[in-house]
Amino acid sequence: MKINWFKYSAPMNFYPLAGKLIPIFWIAAILFITLGLYWGFFKTADVLSDQKQYYRIIYVHVASAWMAMWLYAVMVAWAMIGLVFNTRLSFMMASATAITGTVMTVIALATGAIWGKTSWGTWWDWDPKLTSFLILLFVYIGYIALQSAIDDVRRSDKASALLALVGLALVPIIYYAVNCPDPNECASLHQESSLERVESNILIAMFVTTFGFWMYSFATILMRVRIIILERERKTSWVSKLKEFNG
């Protein structure tokens, strides 16, 4: 049976589909996050026997940092689709993604600060790695604020989409700062990216937790986009019928 996926570009058709997908993503998120953290906390004890226990915060810190950058790219992709094809749902998805991306960025910064205080004796250091990530948070917040500041939905969508496109330059900058080949060029308290040197047991826990964060992001984005759809489509007949059906 051939499925016409283009029909789901309409908010009216996407709304019920999102409702069906949300429980699936929530179950997957809980399962993989629990499994990843359990593996990291209890199955890497021998591997980390020579490390301080605060090292285990990497399972949350790295996963949230990866998701913060990935979600920004996703947000920009939806914004670009909206600008090119003028599709309402694309802008809605970008708006919903911005909230979850902001949450992931805050988690990454907070866990990094805790790690920094315990490991380096300071909550913060103004180096390229940390500063670029802080700027990413400001761009996320600026995107959300710009949407709220403009009453006309169409104008706010396009203005915030342009801001997101400008901020896209931050993603490769952050990646380069973390993976800088010359330590003297990107001097920092933050250690270099070293996945190739990480023990496989730790990598398993890290990737499983990251996949759980990925599923969590899908679940929360779909939940938020359903709310946005109802807000923007509240004057349509199908939303009125939905309200009547739900009492």
Image (cartoon, rainbow, N blue to C red):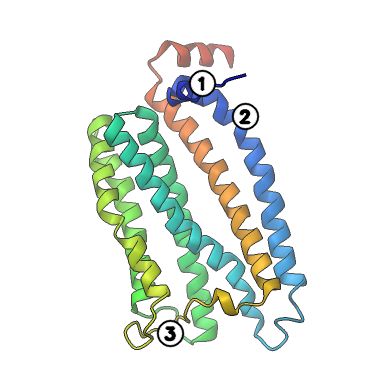
Is 97 rendered above or below residue 182? above
Mark pair 2, 3: CA separation: 45 Å
Label 1 crowd bin: few (<14), some (14–19), many (20+), radius 10 Å: few
Q: Which residue is mark 2?
A: 20
Amino acid bearing label 2: Lys
Mark pair 1, 2: CA separation: 17 Å
Q: Point out which mark residue 4 bears.
A: 1
Q: Which residue is mark 3?
A: 189
Going by the picture, which residue comes out furthest to the front?
Answer: 2
Amino acid bearing label 3: Leu
Is 243 rendered above or below residue 174? above
Image point 42% across, 74% down: which residue?
A: 178
Q: Earlier in the sequence, mark 2 or mark 3?
A: 2
Which quadrant of the figure has residue 40? bottom right
Mark pair 3, 1: CA separation: 52 Å
Amino acid bearing label 1: Asn
Q: Circle 3 — which element?
A: loop
As drawn, is 73 to the left or to the right of 21?
left
As drawn, is 31 to the left or to the right of 58?
right
Image point 29% across, 59% down: which residue?
A: 169
Q: Quadrant of the N terminus?
A: top right
